[in-house]
Amino acid sequence: MGWLRTASNPQRRRTWPDAPQPGSVNPRTGKRYLKAGYAPATINHALTVVASF
């Protein structure tokens, strides 16, 4: 499951040419854009499922 930490999430692809950089801050809202990889909660969930086997 360690590959989830380095793999890019295909659902978070930015296809438009003027897309913001992953992890940068939105100037209007002050929130960060999602990073290109998997969320920590997703990684933790996957580790829990594998450990319960």
Image (tube, rainbow, N blue to C red):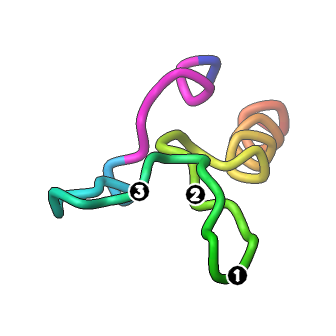
Q: Secondary structure at mark 3?
A: loop
User: Which label sits in the foreground, 2 or 3?
Assistant: 3
Residue at left offset 73%, top offset 69% = 31
Quadrant of the rendered image containing residue 1: top right
Where residue 43 sits in the image (x, y, percent)? 70, 40
Judging depth in this view, the residue of 46 and 9 nearest the camera is 9
Question: Above or below — where is 49 with respect to 7?
Answer: below
Q: Disc 1 or 2, which lies upstream in sequence?
A: 1
- Mark 2 vs 3: CB contact within 8 A: no
Disc ID at residue 19: none
Callout 2 amino acid: Leu
Q: CA distance from mark 3 to mark 1?
A: 14 Å
Q: To which residue does mark 3 refer?
A: 20
Q: To which residue does mark 1 refer?
A: 29
Callout 1 amino acid: Thr
Q: Secondary structure at mark 1?
A: loop
Q: Disc 2 or 3, which lies upstream in sequence?
A: 3
Residue at left offset 72%, top offset 34% = 50
Where residue 7 sits in the image (x, y, percent)? 45, 27
Tell me the magenta residue range. Answer: 3-9
Callout 3 amino acid: Pro
Residue at left offset 30%, top offset 53% = 13
Question: Above or below — where is 27 with respect to 51?
Answer: below
10 Å crowding of disc 1: few (<14), some (14-19), many (20+): few
Q: CA distance from mark 2 to mark 3?
A: 10 Å
Q: To which residue does mark 2 refer?
A: 34
Quadrant of the rendered image containing residue 48: top right
Residue at left offset 57%, top offset 44% = 38
Along the horizontal axis of the image, is 11 left or right of 22? left
Q: Disc 3 or 1, which lies upstream in sequence?
A: 3
